[in-house]
């Protein structure tokens, strides 16, 4: 594996160690105390009243790798960060970089060897595999929903991308085949050719999606928990704000049924939404569906040259260039509370880091169930867990195959559900396939392609198995999935495989530190749109959440949006943005009450 941005901290290198081991005299955790055990120092004050640390000794047992290319220009550095971000997924990195460009001092702590989480990568036998989805939104050069482009630009980065002419090719029951063309008119032409009697309904449903998307795309996207911003946007764009408020508690399936009667077409819209949220259209918030179903035509799907992992690497580089830090092999075991306020984190090796604010890019289940283990679950989180459960994890198969097994006109992304619509949400029922080498051949050796296959799977299917049985089951289930693709799409696929690696929900839990390998929340029943989704603030002072278990949910655009919102709210709370305490109390109380209606 390519251990990108790794700079080993040498024993005796005081400048590197100082960056790696900044701790605090914050509250009851005094610098040099037996609780810290890493270095003793004394807090000094310069004329600008900025704390300085004079380092006298450092333990040689320090482990970890620190990434930093730009020293803190402030004399001696401050010993308390403005924010610590737990995890370097896209949501966490966007939050971190957005804060860093506002001159906040940020420390990102990543358990693994490289950044990205489920948007990371790994290398095997000359192949570069995306860990998660290869369908990339947010890379366009227009509008306000091109959040990946904006996040990269904020830290002086830009990535070369390759436009995908087809978002996904659906292969569905009753031999229904639908290509989602990049051009909206081409997509509508194809879909209405399959359902000519529903042309008016198709235009009506997707027309509502465009109303929502255009409203979102017209707004400057910041924290919906910050009243000065929210009221400012309302006065500037009242119609757009009212449109979003109207659709906030609604789901895509209910809207579709206002326009469409054909059961097979409604099932197709279920499949469209399943890709977005791993649930059917009746359970998918209309705002979430609209973001994806329209941006694929507005900004398009664009694959980053070199692979999806380049997004996180670029953001991490940009973060460091802004004077902030990212520490790898830093496994956060707990969040430190002082008088009910989140003030720091403790790593598995005993190190402790302190900050004014803590941002968790872990799931809410991991944040409150593991990082705050032993603490009483806040009422807000109890309510969240009553409305939402953990979405299923995935069985993933990364394969290298001989190029000749794929027809020359093969699309990059495919969704396969062969026989029965009822199997859409069943474990192993539907298959999502990406072939990123269709767009970027450099990811594989010459004459080879990458196939990245996903299907939903529950961790309960894999728990308690002895190693031999576990490996045997992986091979058996993977063989069945590959056989289905061989029959439906690529004859001779099995015999063309040159590399294969199978991951289960246990794999996702282990490497991505996700409870049961989940990829976010799933409503227990029919939700009221996004009304029940929590935002970034939590009931614990100083603690924020970011990522796919926060508003607006799953997907690249959604978690990037979550990161932007979180950074804005944190910046206001630490004095880097304007805020009104009176309005804050009123708005946060109102949002909390609205969530109880979900």
Image (cartoon, rainbow, N blue to C red):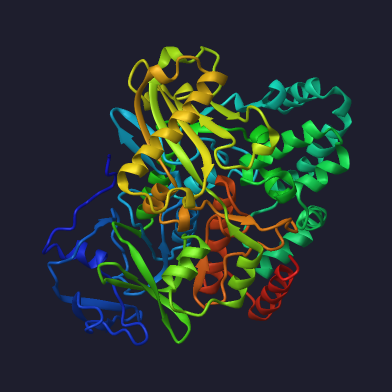
Residue 340, image x, y percentages: 48, 84
Say which of 176 and 60 sits in front. 176
Asked where in the image residue 16 lies, by quadrant, the reply is bottom left
Residue 87 in the image: state x and y as whole percent.
41, 58
Residue 523 appears in the rendering: yes
Q: Give whichever of 588, 55 is nearer the camera.
A: 588
Whether residue 411 sits left or right of residue 156 in the image: it is right
Q: Is residue 307 visible?
A: no
Q: Position of residue 194 (x, y in %)?
A: 78, 22
At 31% from the left edge and 64% from the top edge, which residue is drawn?
Answer: 73
Q: Residue at x 42, y 80 (%)?
A: 337
Compared to 299, does 330 lie above or below?
Answer: below
Seen in the picture, residue 546 relative to 35 is either above or below; the reply is: above
Which residue does the image show at 52% across and 30% down from the upper left?
Answer: 433
- 51 up-or-down from 91: above or below: below
Residue situated in front as seen by the camera: 273 or 338: 273
**Which quadrant of the view contains residue 556?**
top right
Instruction: Name the image quarter holding residue 180.
Output: top right
């Amino acid at each position: 594996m390519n251990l990108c941005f790794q700079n080993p901290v040498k024993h005796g290198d005081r400048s590197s160690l100082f960056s790696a081991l900044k701790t605090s005299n914050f509250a009851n955790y005094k610098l040099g105390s037996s609780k810290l055990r890493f270095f003793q120092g004394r807090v000094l004050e310069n004329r600008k009243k900025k704390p300085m640390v004079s380092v006298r000794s450092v333990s040689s047992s320090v482990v970890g790798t620190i990434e930093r290319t730009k020293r803190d220009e402030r004399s001696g550095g401050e010993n308390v960060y403005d924010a610590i971000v737990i995890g370097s997924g896209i949501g966490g990195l966007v939050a971190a970089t957005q804060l860093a460009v506002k001159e906040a001092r940020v420390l990102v702590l990543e358990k693994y060897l490289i950044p990205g989480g489920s948007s990371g990568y790994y290398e095997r036998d000359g192949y570069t595999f995306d860990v998660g989805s290869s369908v990339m939104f947010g890379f366009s050069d227009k509008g306000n929903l091109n959040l990946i482009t904006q996040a990269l630009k904020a830290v002086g980065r830009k990535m070369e991308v390759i436009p995908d002419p087809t978002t996904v090719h659906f292969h569905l029951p009753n031999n229904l085949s639908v290509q989602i063309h990049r051009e909206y008119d081409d997509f509508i032409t194809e879909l209405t050719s399959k359902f000519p009697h529903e042309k008016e309904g198709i235009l009506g449903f997707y027309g509502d999606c465009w109303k929502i998307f255009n409203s979102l795309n017209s707004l400057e996207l910041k924290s919906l928990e910050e009243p000065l911003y929210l009221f400012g946007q309302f006065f500037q764009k009242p119609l757009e704000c009212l449109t979003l408020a109207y659709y906030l508690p609604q789901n895509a399936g209910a809207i579709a049924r206002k326009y469409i009667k054909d059961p097979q077409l409604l099932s197709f819209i279920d499949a469209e939404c399943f890709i977005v949220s791993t649930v059917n259209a009746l359970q998918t918030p209309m705002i979430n569906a609209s973001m994806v179903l329209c941006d694929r035509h507005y900004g398009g799907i664009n694959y980053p040259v070199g692979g999806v992992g380049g997004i996180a690497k670029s953001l991490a580089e940009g973060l460091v260039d802004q004077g902030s830090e990212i520490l790898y092999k830093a496994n956060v075991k707990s969040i430190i509370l002082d008088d009910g306020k989140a003030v720091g984190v403790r790593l598995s090796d005993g190190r402790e880091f302190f900050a004014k604010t803590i941002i968790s890019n872990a799931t809410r289940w991991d944040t409150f169930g593991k990082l705050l283990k032993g603490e009483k679950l806040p009422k807000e989180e109890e309510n969240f867990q009553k409305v939402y459960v953990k979405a299923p994890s995935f069985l993933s198969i990364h394969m290298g195959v001989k190029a000749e097994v794929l027809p020359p006109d093969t699309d990059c992304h495919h969704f396969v559900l062969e026989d029965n619509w009822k199997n859409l949400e069943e474990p192993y029922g539907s298959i999502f396939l990406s072939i990123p080498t269709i767009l970027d051949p450099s990811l594989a050796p010459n004459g080879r392609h990458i196939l990245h296959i996903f299907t939903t799977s529950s961790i309960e299917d894999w728990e308690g198995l002895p190693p031999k049985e576990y490996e045997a089951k992986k091979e058996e289930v993977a063989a069945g999935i590959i056989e289905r693709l061989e029959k439906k799409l690529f004859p001779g696929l099995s015999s063309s495989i040159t590399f294969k690696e199978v991951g289960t929900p246990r794999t996702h839990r282990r490497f991505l530190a996700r409870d049961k390998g989940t990829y976010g929340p799933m409503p227990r029943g029919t939700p009221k749109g996004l009304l029940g989704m929590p935002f970034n603030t939590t009931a614990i002072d100083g603690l924020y959440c970011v990522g796919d278990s926060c508003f607006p949910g799953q997907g690249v655009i959604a978690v990037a949006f979550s990161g932007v919102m979180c950074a804005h709210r944190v910046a206001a709370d630490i004095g880097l943005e304007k805020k009104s305490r009176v309005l804050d109390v009123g708005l946060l109380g109102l949002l909390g009450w609205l969530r109880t209606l979900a």
